[in-house]
Image (tube, rainbow, N blue to C red):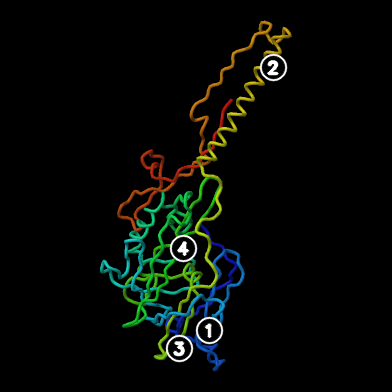
Amino acid sequence: MAFQSSATGILGLAFRAISVQQLPTVLDDMFAQHPGMAHKFTFYLTRAAGEEGSRVVFGEADTRALAAGPLAYAPVVSPTYWTVGISEFGVGGVSLCGGANGTAPCSGLVDSGTSFIGVSEARYPALMAALAAAADCVYRDFATHVYLVCDCSADGAAAFPPLRIRLSAGPGRPPVVVDLAPQDYIQTYPSLFQTLCVPLVLPVPPDKFAVTAGDIFVLGMPLLRAYLTEFDADGGPDGHPRVGFAPTAAPGLPATMPRPLPRRALFALLVATQVAMLASVALEYVRRHKKAGDTGTGGGAPGATLPLSLTFSADDVVAPLDDEPCLTTTDPDGPYGAYGADSGDAAASASCLDTPIVPILAL
């Protein structure tokens, strides 16, 4: 699965602590050249693909028309990347960070350059298992990543539970709630025969970001599309860097996108169409040979009708659109809950997504 972009480069907006040779960053130079500018920048991303209006504002931003409420701030716990503390991250009854089951807190990198939500590799299988229980899902390998691909033809993204994300706001303060609705982190792909859903969630290796102790999560564009995000280098009264979040004012995408007819209804329609074609062919066959018999041609007795026999097998009636093998579990100890290529084993094929079928009658 490839994500194409027209971007021609990357503009780093993190702290000087991780710059090459501790050189001043773009933000350092910008703030030095404009002493009166507030040391902050704000991202507002539209939710719908292709929708105009996304923006980044350096300095003080008027967020009244962009946010559905006031900003709630989480302090930066490691001034390297824009890293905040995650007091709880979970789905349904599964808590990956904090929560009632006593799991340790985690750290979250708020990153506008990441197109997905990154989950600590050690905790990724538990989250995928919880999401896979919501629909008929398998793992599939697309280029450099392994994705959970689910058949969500019945309910679309609404088949999945919301992601529960709570950020630490500091001692004695209630957490910052940045939950994601299913349509915020589930990408839907409607097609002729079914709708596929892909959670925009990928694992983060433990050595990917050596910025702080503990498990690292990445809060990427799915979260930034749902929440206007302010990166404040000066911070509040204490002067500590912080990140503010407020729900975007624009409504989210519909949980279920327009879909074609259900597969069973479409299959029945195609079968009926081809049966009607078969009946038409049979009637024409009989009519022509009856006419030939009436005129004394065609080798039959006058007025006789020739017997009509059409035979076909199940393989002639139903044929797969493609024979692409799907991926099934082969290694229960694998990092993604295990996956492997299906080599044609019937038992393994049972866990794959239903292959779209189309009736083909052989005459």
- Amino acid of disc 2: Arg
Residue at image coords 59%, 71%: 8
Distance between the Cα atoms at labels 3 and 1?
Answer: 16 Å
Secondary structure at numbered mark 4: helix
Residue at image coords 41%, 40%: 344
Q: Is residue 97 above or below residue 79?
A: above
> Label 4 crowding class (10 Å Cα cut-off): few <14, some 14-19, many 20+?
many
Q: Residue furthest left?
A: 102
Question: In the rendered structure, are the residues bearing label 4 and label 3 in contact, judged by CB atoms less than 8 Å apart?
Answer: no
Along the line of sight, the residue nearer the viewer: 322 or 229: 229
Which residue in the structure is indicated by mark 2?
288
Which residue in the structure is indicated by mark 1?
26
- Amino acid of disc 1: Val
Q: Residue furthest right?
A: 295
> Tag 4 or tag 2, which sits nearer the N-term?
4
Question: In the rendered structure, are the residues bearing label 2 and label 3 in contact, judged by CB atoms less than 8 Å apart?
Answer: no
> Label 1 crowding class (10 Å Cα cut-off): few <14, some 14-19, many 20+?
some
> Tag 1 or tag 2, which sits nearer the N-term?
1
Which residue in the structure is indicated by mark 3?
234
The location of residue 183, given as percent across then percent down, is 48, 61
Q: Is residue 73 above or below residue 181?
A: below
> Label 3 crowding class (10 Å Cα cut-off): few <14, some 14-19, many 20+?
some
The location of residue 57, given as percent across then percent down, is 56, 81
Along the line of sight, the residue nearer the viewer: 242 or 83: 242
- Amino acid of disc 4: Tyr
- Label 3 or label 1, whichever lies nearer to me, is 3
> Tag 1 or tag 4, which sits nearer the N-term?
1
Which residue in the structure is indicated by mark 4?
185
